[in-house]
Amino acid sequence: MGRQIATMRLQFHYQLKEFEQVDQIFATHGFMKGPMLADPMTVAMKMARQYKNKDIEGVEKTFKKQIKWFRGNKGKLPYGVLSWVYVKEGRTDEARSLLAKAKDSTGEEAFSANWVQLSNNNVKNFSNAGLGEEWFGLYLENPPMPKQKMVRPKGGNMRGF
């Protein structure tokens, strides 16, 4: 029960962007104290915090330890975080290799598109936005701004507008 409460507190603080408390919860060790890493979002949160705290080896270690538990499309967030970290760290060859595995194991179109971008050396076009709202909930990438529509005046006359 203690681990479930820690996991709920972790998710709550993460959504509120209270990252100091999130880091404290992740640092809690011991029997029945730390959060459960049973779902992909919690694993992705841990990986995102490790990246923000400049612990790249920790990101890779968490990924390798946890990805085996997520079958099919469930592993999309951990794959997304690690590929994002590799691109931001300038390790595009490793990111491309990881994306090849990710697109085969998850079937996500976003990974295929990113693999093509990296294969064509278009690193600036790399984006995990195709992973949806869960991805933006990790606060690694900002959601795209909605396109503004031009408001037409009543009657359709554009003169004097």
Image (spheres, rainbow, N blue to C red):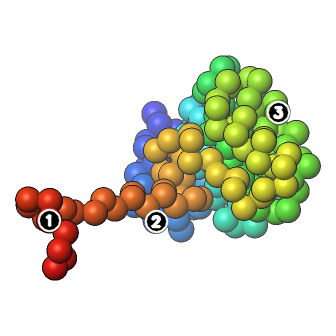
Mark 2 to mark 1 CA distance (whole Å)? 50 Å
Mark 1 vs 3, N-terminal side? 3
The residue that label 1 is drawn on is 157
Please give the name of the residue rendered at 61% of the width and 27% of the height, measured from the top-left corner.
74
- Mark 3, Cα crowd under 10 Å, few <14 / some 14-19 / many 20+, is some
Mark 2 to mark 3 CA distance (whole Å)? 34 Å
Please state the horizontal and vertical placement of residue 7, each as a whole percent of the image.
49, 43
Q: Is residue 90 left or right of residue 158?
A: right
Q: Nearer the viewer, mark 1 or mark 3?
A: 1
Q: Secondary structure at mark 1?
A: loop
Dot 1 and dot 3 residues touching (CB under 8 Å): no
Q: Amino acid at mark 2?
A: Glu
The residue that label 3 is drawn on is 100
Of residues 112 and 55, the one nearer the viewer is 112
Residue 18: give its label: 2
- Tell me if residue 99 comes above or below residue 141 in the rendering: above
Please give the name of the residue rendered at 8% of the width and 61% of the height, measured from the top-left corner.
154
Q: Amino acid at mark 3?
A: Ala
Of residues 24 and 104, the one nearer the viewer is 104
Q: Is residue 83 left or right of residue 151?
A: right
Of residues 25 and 88, the one nearer the viewer is 88
Residue 45: give its label: none
- Mark 1, Cα crowd under 10 Å, few <14 / some 14-19 / many 20+, is few
